[in-house]
Amino acid sequence: MSKDCCEKRIDADALRRQERRVLAIVLAINLATFVLMVAAAIQGRSTSLLSGGLDNLGDALTYAASLAVVGSTLQVKARVALLKSALILFAAIAVAVQIAWRLAHPATPIFETIGIAALINLAANIACLRLLHPYRHGDVNMASAWECSRNDVGEGLAVLVAGAGVWLFDSGWPDMLIAVALLAMFLRSSFRVFSASLQGLRAPG
């Protein structure tokens, strides 16, 4: 029995080390893509790119929070998941503000800038999703991190569609339309993470 307990403890320690390594990698990737997306959004006059960049920043903060509570109790992880829900909601609010600002200051985005930045961002997001995929059914901490990563892939695809729409119609409305779709996706994700965190808080010890 002592041997079994020792082996279980070693397995748990190895799992926590692996989780920390994965979260550290996706944190670094999201910080890098945040800088890329914001710079490209300013240069390319794109609301969808800026929305994606703000989402990447929120995700980086989310991954940092996840990294901090690896190995903590379910209650602690559930409380941090509430913070993640708030960060996703903040991203949604930021997108809404950008949409309102662009409506007041219309401009046609530069589709080449959108396309290049979106492709790089999508590749980075897919890499993060693959890293987190084994943990999608794990505890609320890792599952919520995977939820954020899945959002990122959807966001990356949506921004590519925005770039194609801007090129096809020579107009800024496809960029705005995708930004509105991203807003809806962030709101839905915030609710999902919030619900999961409440379940974790209600769970015994």
Image (cartoon, rainbow, N blue to C red):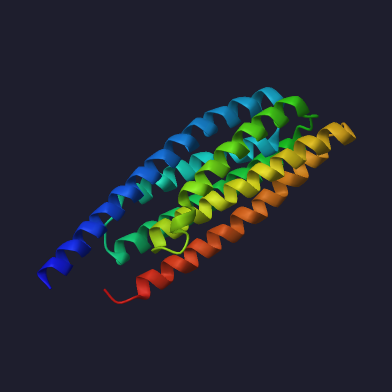
- Where residue 137 sits, quadrant-wise, is bottom left
Quarter assignment of residue 101: top right
Task: Give the residue drawn at x 53%, y 42%.
Answer: 127
On the picture, is 157 further left or further right than 94? right
The correct choice, above or below, for 41 with respect to 187 in the image is above
The quadrant of the image that shows the N terminus is: bottom left
* Residue 116, image x, y percentages: 68, 28
Taking the spot 82% from the left edge, 40% from the top edge, the residue there is: 173
The reply, left or right, for residue 160 in relation to residue 10 is right
Q: Estimate the x, y position of residue 143 in percent, counting from the top left.
A: 45, 59
Q: Residue furthest right?
A: 169
Residue appearing at x 52%, y 51% in the figure: 148
Q: Answer yes or no: is residue 61 visible.
A: yes
- Left or right of residue 157: residue 186: left
**In the figure, 138 relative to 127: above or below?**
below
Question: Can see residue 53?
Answer: no
Write the residue at 42% across / 70% down: 198
Residue farthest along the top direction in this orientation? 43
Between 145 and 12, which is closer to the camera in this rendering?
A: 12
Residue 76 percent location from the top left of the image: 30, 61
Q: How many marks?
A: 0
**99 and 23: which is toward the camera:** 23
Q: Position of residue 52 (x, y in %)?
A: 61, 40
- Quadrant of the image containing the C terminus: bottom left
